[in-house]
Image: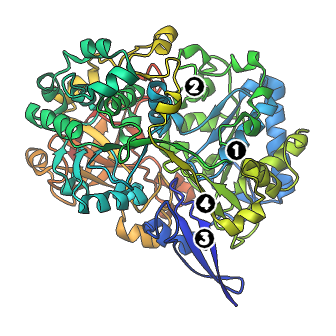
Amino acid sequence: MERIVKSACGLCQTGCGIRVRLVGDRLGEITGDPESPVNKGHLCRKGKAALEYLHHPDRLKKPLLRDGPRGGGRWLEISWGEALDRVAAGLEQTRSACGPEGLIFIRGSFKGGYEGAYLARLANVLGAPNIASMAPVCYVPRVLGSQMTCGYNPVPDYEFPPRGVLVWGANLAETRPGEHQDTLLALEQGTGLIVVDPRKTLLAGRADLHLPILPGTDLILALALIDEGLYDKSFVEKWCAGFEALADQVRPFSPSWAAPLTGLEAAAIEKAARLYAQRRPAVIQVGNAIDHSPHNFQIARALAILRAITGNLGVPGGELKADPPPVLPMGSPALDLRDKLPEAMRARRLDARNGLLPLVFYSLPQTITRAVLEEDPYPVRFAYIQGGNPLLTYPNARRTFEALKALDFLAVADLFMNPTAALADVVLPAASCFETDAVIAPPYYPVVQVQQQVARIGECRSDYAMIAGLARRLGLGEFFWEHEQDCLDFILKPAGLLFDEFRQIGVLVGRKDYRHYEKSGFATPSQKVELSSPRLAAWGFDPLPAYALAPEATDGATGNAEYPLVLTSWKVEEFRHSGNRQMESLRAGHPEPVVWIHPETAGPLGLQDGASVWIETPTGRIRQRARITSAIRPGVAGVDYGWWFPEEGMASGYDWAASNVNILTDDRGESGKEMGTPRLRGLSCRVLRVD
């Protein structure tokens, strides 16, 4: 008997709708769901490799216990009961010796569901203040910057459609396929396109104006685009607060000032400002590139201000307040039980003394490694990592390696063994998105979709099952539902639905709210767009986006004799962060790490296309293969991110340091005042031939 099951892909954060064809109990095919508002039937390469991912022979299928020295590559298969008992014992030993602050719970890349909230729930009922996530380097800086400015995170309205699209540091074709398709459709209808990116992406090749910015100088360009003469006077007078202060602030930040720092022509910056301001309605599609800067919150603020003063908020074809479907939000206190964490303990979290935004409660990677290695501000001895690989994703990877080795107990829950899991005491086999029921809430869309279990691999378990099982061993079972479906029913309760009913519905779509401010104002203290923020001023931060010349930006713009190039990195369609390197079909399209270098840069350095090269910063050195191409701006090294080599085996640590871009980043340098983010792009580097 053949049937079709609607579900959602969890191989990246987008949460594309999929259709799973089942023949009896066997999976026959996975295709994009044309009825999904997220991807409208389109699937990326990762989605098309879903069956290979699901059935890959390297999938973890049973819990593993380290047998021998940490990182030695020897393991014993154990039962789930023993595995959770050992994790609970390791946790209790640390809590007894160091207090609950000696524990760290680390959330890895977003899977589309509520897994992060489950882990936060456990930490809060334990009274443990330290939880880490991707927040300081992914999406959250953009959200907070927008919310502090206009009270919401704007959603582009492609249905109208927009007359102008500004894509900034986002390769939509490879990372957000649904929005890429929306943008292509808009272009067919005559929409103008500006792309800000140091490389020539697919969309950059179709743009009316491509600005190949020098990496790390996004705030400079954003300030230069805020032109006091290009604004919607009616909207600003009625709905914006602080315009005169803004005009005074940005007046020195002219295109001619920004040009030498950003590596762009002043005329091109002026043209971009006019095109965006005059081709209304318009939207700005911002990507992960701006999140990797210490100035990420400031950049997000500047772009939110740009949207506002040009009158592109709330209008058809502009950027809207979209009310999400009526389900429990991921950040709901009813779900993460944050009130169970005593305020005195919250005040002891690792980064409480660092003066970050009061909205920030996570632990920073650099603070975690310092606490483990230097016991500053106190020792951290136990870590639980859920779907993450910090050895590849945290700055200063060698220091991260030392911290992971120094822990008293490390537990990792994942689908595959990876360099971080290889250092663990216990490894827990996680179920994939095809093996679990879930409510999926993609970050870029006001929708929720159903995810349905269609397969079972080995003894793999969902993150909820692992966390609830651990909670019961710690005497905290009362805070978790006996069955995971009861938790999903709780999430759907505001919509009046049970999960079994949601299976039949498949998707709930939120409501776009046009000109919502005319009914209730903006969700800020002044009920206006706060171009100048009194709240930020009261908290001790710049009330307006400000810029002070950073050493790295100076080096990159003027040329550093020892490290003359500027480093950036990006994600590619085949992989998600450090994942998928085991997939033969995906590795066939991208078999090894490559660094993009412009011919004008490569020539004087004696670099040949395809040659093996060293990339160096003051922090370290890695090896990748040169791709000589005019698709990257001169003076820039575009380094492949997330590389390790499963084929090299566990005994070598999968050669995790050979090509890992985070060997080159530093966890002890400049970091952002608001979010604590270190500089991950825009670093000074050099590229040398491997002789």
Using a 10 Å C-alpha cutoff, classify the residue at mark 1 as few (fewer than 14 neighbours), some (14 to 19) or many (20 or more): some
Check contact, mark 1 vs mark 4: CB within 8 A.
no
Type of amino acid at the residue the image marks with label 4? Phe
- Which residue lies under the disc numbered 1? 328
- Which residue lies under the disc numbered 3? 54
Residue located farthest toward the front when viewing the structure as drawn: 519
Q: Nearer the viewer, residue 407 or 183?
A: 183
Q: Nearer the viewer, residue 606 or 139?
A: 139
- Which residue lies under the disc numbered 4? 416
Name the secondary structure under disc 4. loop
Above or below for 466 versus 286: below
Q: What percent of the width, then of the height, locates residue 307?
A: 34, 34
Which dot, 3 or 4, sits closer to the camera?
3
Name the secondary structure under disc 1. loop
Using a 10 Å C-alpha cutoff, classify the residue at mark 4 as few (fewer than 14 neighbours), some (14 to 19) or many (20 or more): many
Using a 10 Å C-alpha cutoff, classify the residue at mark 2 as few (fewer than 14 neighbours), some (14 to 19) or many (20 or more): some
Residue 577 makes an appearance in the image: yes
Using a 10 Å C-alpha cutoff, classify the residue at mark 3 as few (fewer than 14 neighbours), some (14 to 19) or many (20 or more): some
- Whichever of callouts 4 and 2 sits on the residue coming sooner in the sequence is 2
- Whichever of callouts 1 and 4 sits on the residue coming sooner in the sequence is 1
Check the picture and name the quadrant holding the N terminus: bottom right
Check contact, mark 3 vs mark 2: CB within 8 A.
no
3D distance between C-alphas at marks 3 and 4: 11 Å
- Which residue lies under the disc numbered 2? 360
3D distance between C-alphas at marks 1 and 2: 21 Å
- Whichever of callouts 3 and 1 sits on the residue coming sooner in the sequence is 3
The residue under the point 36% across, 16% down is: 544
Q: Write down the quadrant of residue 418 in the picture.
A: bottom right
Type of amino acid at the residue the image marks with label 2? Val
